[in-house]
Each structure stands twice: as structure tokens, then as C-alpha cells.
Amino acid sequence: MLFLDPWFWRFALVAVVGFWLVPKPAKLVWLIVTSAFFHFHFAGPAGMAPIIALGVFTYYAGLRISRDNESRLFVVAMVMLAGALGFYKYTAFLLNGLTDAIGGIAGKESVAWLADWENPVAPLAISFFTFEFVHYLYEVRKHGREPIRNPLHFTLFAIFFPTLASGPIKRYADFVPQLEQLKNPSVARAWGGAQRVVLGLFKKICIADLTVEIIQVLDRTPTHTPHLVATLAVLQGFRIYFDFAGYSDMAIGLAEMLGLKVPENFDRPYQSTSLQDFWRRWHMSLSSWIRDYVYIPLGGNQGQRHLHILTAMALCGLWHGAAWNFVAWGAYHGLGLGLESMVRTRAPGLFGDSRGLRFARWFVCYSFVSYGWLLFFYPMSTVIQMNREAFRWLFAG
């Protein structure tokens, strides 16, 4: 996590205090310069090149699409952005799958050269800025929103340093208008932002990192009893929540100290009483993006709704990493959402508001989500072994 690098906090102090001190007309330029410096420090020239190239293309494509209603340019832009993300993040994953498929037919020797392929070094935050660019062009083309005409506004939208590395994923219609009137935050707002940053650090260092230490000890246990598997599932859930929510708190707090508001990312997700509710509360900037730019374009609630859900969630899982366990985790949630939708339709009484029903739904939802974290954090072979050993222990008992 970049926010734990000591250099970052020296940089953030200069960036925030400098923003407060520079005159109002210079604040936008100050944020652009400091964000570019942040990106250069962690990514270097080679890491900055893709976001510069894709950003310039996206900026001019947005203007052209808005002016001329260019459908072909929109398609080209979508393919380019998806291709860049796929090339840097998923090439080796796809080639490994191709190697296994062809090798099983023609022999592994015929595709041995593919097995040596390694992904190029991914540019900093490519998973986030490509999603923001896709969102921007989709809104301009499909919903007729006004494009960003000021290139400085677009630049800061693309590289704003608090959200650059790990989100939250911004919506330009909410973020860019704030840049028209950049000013120092009130003392209360800046203090609230600072408290949010400290809270995020506490979540990350004192809870998430400590939980990782406990998990590493438990992972060395030779036999996976049902109690151990359940404990690992719950601890992995705590780990990822406090890690990611901590980062989001720091990003949101830093933005507040600069007088800017970015999206919330978590809203007490483990209090959810249904999977649908969970995905309204968990990683909200991503889940709403998946809904708006994958699920709805696929057809949403029309036609093969359950297939749309499964596809969208599998892609959501793949976004987290180029491995089959992430795809399995996403598909697991997709199947769960589809099953929940069927139960809601056929047995609506189970979704009543009585205290007993709410507790039962919470328990089922929390158990389902917690088990899913095993798929997220462990290879499929390890999860299968865990389940086999747990069932063997139960049977033996």
C-alpha cells in the first residue's frame, strides 16, 4: 500500500499545506503538479506513459464523440481501453489458459514458448483509471452528458493522487464541477479529513495487518478442521474489510483536506441482511460501476437476468486479479445473487421485517460472504483441500 510508504506522508504534508498556502488561481495547477510528482515517484516515466497516452486520447475522443455523435470512435475507444487493461494485467493469464487448452490437444511441447510469457509491468492504477475513462466516455456517448472541456480539469480527474492508486472510483459529473471553485476547506472540514486519515491508518495497521499475522499462524496448522476453516473465513473477511476500508478512509480524508469530495466506498457491509444489500454497501464505487457499465449494458433485468448477473460478477472477480480463484469468487457471488433473487420471488415472506427473519437473513448472508473470502484469498486447490479435510474431520467425528 503506497500510503504506508514514509515518503508518501512527507509528500502529502507538502501537498496539503502547499494547497492551503498557494493563491486560489494556482490551486488547480498545484494539485496537478503534486499529483504528477506522486505518479512519477511511484511509477517512473515508463509507468506514466500509458496513462498519458490513454488520457490524451480519451480527452479528445470525449470532445469528438460529444460534438459529432461518433459511434465508431466510441467503440474504438472502448476497445483501446479494455485492450490496454487486458494487455498489462491479463495477457499471461489468458495465454496460460490457451497453453493448457492447446497443450491438452497437441501436446505441451507445441506451445512451450507461450509458457514463458510474463505480463509487462502494469502501470500504476491501470485498473482504476481505465474504469474512470470508460465511465467518462460511456456517459458522454450514451447519456449525452457534457464532456470535460478544460484539459486541466480532465488531467486532475485522471491523476488526482489520493484516489489514483486504489480508488474510490470517481464519477466525473460529481468530481469535475468541484474544480471550478477550488478553495481551502473550513477548519472543521480539514480537521474531519485528518481524523478520517488517522482512522484509516488505524484500520489498516492495527486491525488489518494484525489480522494477517494471525492468519499466517493459522495457515501453518496441518489439518483444516471445520472450526479452523470457519475462523479463517471470518478473519479473511476482517482482513480485507479493514485493509480496503482503511485505504478508502485515508483517500477520502486527504481529499477532504484539499476541499474535495470523492465517493464513499463502504457502508457497514457486514450488517447486510441480503447479498443484494451487501453489494450496495461493499466497495460501492466498484459495485455501482459494474452495475452501470457491465450489468445494465448486458441487458440488466431484461432477458437472461441471471446470466447477466453471473457474467457481471465473474468480471468483477477478474478485475481484482488475474487468477481463477478471483473468477470463482465473483461467480460464487453471481450464483448467490441469482439464487437470492429466485427465493425473493418465490418466497417473499422470508424477506419480512420481523427481528427473527432479519437475524436469520443476516446470518445466512454473513456466512455466505465469509466463506467466499476463502475463494478470494486461496488458490482453488487449497480451498478444495480445506473442504475435503473439514468434511473428513466431521465424518470421522
Image (spheres, rainbow, N blue to C red):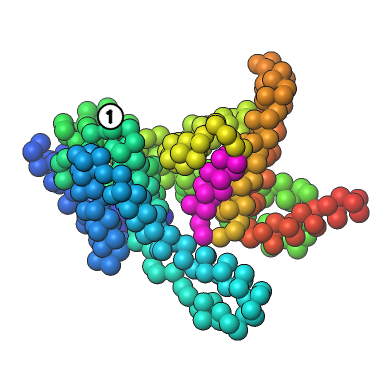
Left/right of residue 291 with respect to residue 3 in the rendered view:
right
Q: Nearer the viewer, residue 101 or 157?
A: 101
In the picture of the structure, the residue carrying the numbered disc 1 is 189
Q: Quadrant of residue 293?
A: top left
In the figure, 362 relative to 311: above or below? above
Residue type at tag 1: Arg
Asked whether residue 318 is drawn in magenta, I would say: yes
User: Which secondary structure type mostly characterizes the magenta part of the structure?
Assistant: helix
Is 7 left or right of 390, judged from the image as shown?
Answer: left
The correct choice, above or below, for 115 with respect to 135 in the image is below
Residue 176: x and y in percent read: 23, 36
Q: Residue at x 71, y 18 (%)?
A: 349
Residue nearer the viewer, 7 or 66 = 66
Q: Nearer the viewer, residue 250 or 369?
A: 369
Quarter that holds the N terminus: bottom left
Residues shaded magenta: 307-322
